[in-house]
Image (tube, rainbow, N blue to C red):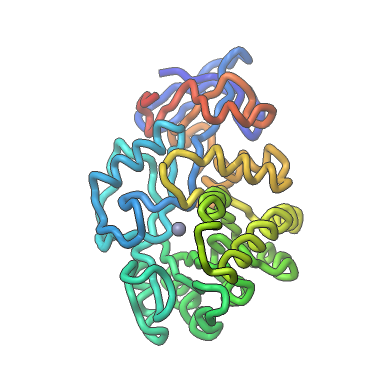
Amino acid sequence: MRIWGIALPSRAPVSFVVDGERLRASGTSTSDGLWLLPGLVDVHSHAGTEAPTDAYSHEVFRRHMLAHRAAGVLTVRSPGSADPVLDRADDADLPRLARSGRWLATPGRFFAGAGRRVEEDELPSAAVEEAVAGWCKVIGDWMPDDPPVPLDVLTATVDAVHAAGRRVAVHCQTAEGCRNAVLAGADSLEHGMHLDHSLLSRMAAQGTALVPTFTAFAGVLKGLEKSSDARFREWIQGGWEHAFPTVRAAYEAGVTVLAGTDNKPCGEVAGEISWLIKAGMPVEAAVGAGSWTARAWLGLPGLVDGGFADVVGYDADPCEEPDVLTRPRLIVLRGKLVG
Ligand SMILES: [Zn+2]
């Protein structure tokens, strides 16, 4: 198979042949080909369950991952899963998976009955256990007026996981929870809804990414009038309005902002990219947040000689016409034509 076109983000004309699962530069390229990305990436997707309280189902996992693949999403990070099996080999048909273990929830935090429940003093060792595949996911706070995981506990947790060579994603939505996640040195803030902008320079300096998950909150917002809890409604509405200037300011401060949907159906990261654009990120940075920037952050190469043969092609430049991201013309995963 030969693939040629304009590669993003370099905008260089490229020509590759597929050699097994790898790309090999070959011959001269023409500029008539497709616009090429190294696949889209959804960095926050819980494949395998429809809701956090469901039992993990591999059949559901496959369905979710195939929906991602059909949309050109060739890499998925799962920050929190119901799946207690941490050593399952990757399925070659499915997008690449960066996985954490189970959601780690301390008392009073997270959906009742969901995730792995631990006491605060057990969190550091449990996090190391769950991070065996690369990531762990800590529920750092929960409802608006409840205390977050204390800073000393979260710091000990992040330190223990880092000492094991793994990374920590922290769910945080309150200002205090976000602050603790940043001060503890988390690798990513998931949601970061009420994040104080004074923390952005520290996030940039220490390499803490922000995954704002607009797609999920747009869904919460739709059902919000049904909630009888006025405090909850005000907290969500205020957080939603705060998230737009936060994403813009985070980008400008040099924070890595990434596209994650945290939502069903799977395969809608193009919609998250459009939310990042609405928040004021330059279009190219927003497309990168759901593609090459996210891949690099996960340690995966882009469209280079010897890189993985993961390629999605479009008829137009997604940085000029981001809507084209919903209409992939070519999908190649691990060297196989799949769409
Ligand atoms: Zn989530």
Q: Quadrant of the C terminus?
A: top left
Residue 229: % across, % down: 53, 69
Tell which of 171 and 33 is nearer to you. 171
Residue 95: % across, % down: 38, 40
Q: In the rendered view, does 287 fall on the left or right side of 166?
A: right
Q: In the rendered view, does 51 fall on the left or right side of 153?
A: left
Visible in this render: residue 127? yes
Q: Using the rendered view, name the quadrant where residue 266 is placed.
A: top left
Q: In which quarter of the image is the N terminus?
A: top left
Quadrant of ligand 1 in image: bottom left
Residue shown at 50%/25% (left/top)? 328
Residue shown at 27%/45% (left/top)? 60
Tell which of 69 and 19 is nearer to you. 69
Residue 53: % across, % down: 32, 62
Residue shown at 56%/82% (left/top)? 151
Q: Using the rendered view, name the quadrant where residue 247 is placed.
A: bottom right
Residue shown at 45%/74% (left/top)? 163
Q: In the rendered view, does 198 fall on the left or right side of 89?
A: right
Visible in this render: residue 208? no
The image shows a total of numbered marks equal to 0
Tell which of 165 and 320 is nearer to you. 320
